[in-house]
Amino acid sequence: MALTTHTASNHATDQLGYTALPALLRRMRGDEKHDWASESTIDVIWTLYDRVLRVDPLDPENPDRDRFYLSKGHGPMAYYAVLTAKGFIDPAMLDGFAGPDSILGHHPDRRLIPGVEISSGSLGQGLALGIGATTALALSRSSGRVFVLMGDGELDEGSNHEAIAYAARAELDALNVVVVDNDSATHGWPGGIARRFDVEGWSVETVDGRDHLAMEAAFTARHPGRPRAVIAEVGGVR
Amino acid sequence: MTMRDRFDEVVVDLLDEDPSAVLVLAAIAAGRVLPAARRRGVADRVVDVGIREQTQVGVAGGLALEGFRPILMSYAPFVVERPFEQIKISLSHQGVDAIIVSVGASWDASTAGRTHQAPEDVAVMSTLPGWSIHVPGHEDEAEAALRSAYFDGGSHYIRLANDTNQAPVSGMPGRIRTIRRGPSEAMTVLAIGPMLDDVVAATDELDTTVLYTNVVRPIDGRTLAAATLGTDIVVVEPYLSGTSVPAVASALSDRPMRIHAVGVDDPDVAMYGTAADHRRHHRLDVPGLRERFLAVERRRTALSA
């Protein structure tokens, strides 16, 4: 079955554009004043769903779809807004965010939310899950790729460093990581996060995490025999 | 042949029998399994991540999310206790299943010290919803546990041990079996897994009913309730004492009963020596068990006088 990337021109369902995201975020927050651009992940997730991922809300179980794993789990409103804009989540679900009857909370639960591939929130678990999924897709001869979104603070968890080393040694070239770097790691990453992946043999690129075209190019570059790490810099929070 | 040797054989059979089976290892057991897996052409479904147990469990979760049936194996402290949060989140909370097999048990690595011993493993795994826990007492029971766990679906923890009973106990997996009926039925001993032979030897001269199970979660409460007729039951398990007492208490909650926990009271023993030395230290050898059963019997007699 052919899967296409989601663009406004090629998708049949009613989809919303990037400019609709602030209103969707406000609907979750019930807050008019909050600066929506402060969502560190919003441009990364938008770019992935709008320009990169082969996913379709009308065919959510397609074995050849790409898998997006929000590993860091924190601040998932940007994720929910994009899933809503792309037709996975009914906009009515945004009301009553994190309430007792809401499927949407401060960390996503895959058992509740359409289109969410993993439950996350405990930092440092998504990359190993992504490695397992990538291994599975190779065994199944699927053309699907796996994209794992992590945070620079999340990289502090030691489990990631087990996984970063193994993924490169296993030559998992259908595995892609994007580290959203907002300089929130407690002790920082001297010399840059890219070096941490590079030394293990990953294909690495550092880009502006607000530049959609640059990110699209980084996410679609070829990296045969090696997993890919894209470091998306979005400016510090401190 | 030990339970572990049997696992090495059966797991390769399972890889051969079912293309959904994947063995996920963290160095331990790779050298024992890979040669046969290569000969049988199934080595692509043996994933060895190296000494990385958090990754081992996470990778199993990712495989399960994509429809594979992962089997994980290592020493109990490394595959249960170290990556426990990954078991909770990367498996259970994702809504996916796996089979975790451990070796080492409570004192098999008797000369290796505390780091390689996990008398708490069953108690820890019992806190997670939905996991079945198998404590086979013989290599045949270990194979039956692995096969039924694999093909029945769901999540299973299978605890392999060097200690073994002389003969397997036949019957439905998970069903409590009556091994012996005491004349008065006043006292019952529930022997778990490899404790059975020593329990039988230690109750030789006693007026005691002996029951057996190799599945402690879920426990076969219906048979337990029907087979337990007296005032006292002793639960004998080769790991943290009292681990199965809540399940036994729940099964017997329709009557007044005294429930006695016999197991490992002292998980951090700070001693080396043999497995027999450890069993003696924990009073889980035949003389120690007999002494403890007699104490229960004396108290029962005194209370009923």
Image (tube, helix red, strand yellow):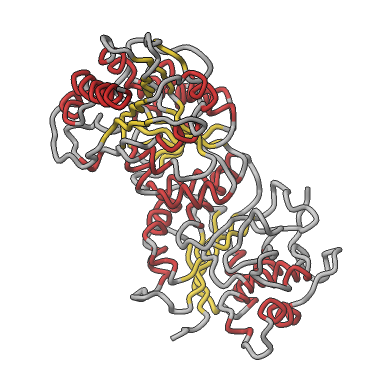
Q: Position of residue A68 (x, y in %)?
A: 62, 59
Against A31, residue B302 (above or below) is: above
Image quarter hosting the N terminus of chain B: top left
Q: Position of residue B298 (x, y in %)?
A: 24, 22
- Please identify the quarter of the rendering in which residue A211 is found: bottom right
Residue lying furthest bottom in this view? A33
Instruction: Count the marks.
Output: 0
Q: Position of residue B32 (x, y in %)?
A: 35, 27
Locate residue A114 relative to residue B230 in the image: left or right: right
Against B138, residue A168 (above or below) is: below
A35 and B288: which one is in front? B288
B241 and A189: which one is in front? B241
Q: Position of residue B108 (x, y in %)?
A: 25, 29
Image quarter hosting the C terminus of chain B: top left
Against A40, residue A114 (above or below) is: above
- Please identify the quarter of the rendering in which residue B228 is found: top left
Tell me, yes or no, if residue B46 can be seen here: no
Locate residue B31 relative to residue A17 in the image: left or right: left
- Name the residue at 51% across, 61% down: A228
- Name the residue at 52% across, 74% down: A232
- Please identify the quarter of the rendering in which residue B126 is found: top left
Against B92, residue A41 (above or below) is: below
- Name the residue at 52% across, 31% down: B254
Tell me, yes or no, if residue A101 can be seen here: yes
A103 and A88: which one is in front? A103
B168 and A91: which one is in front? B168
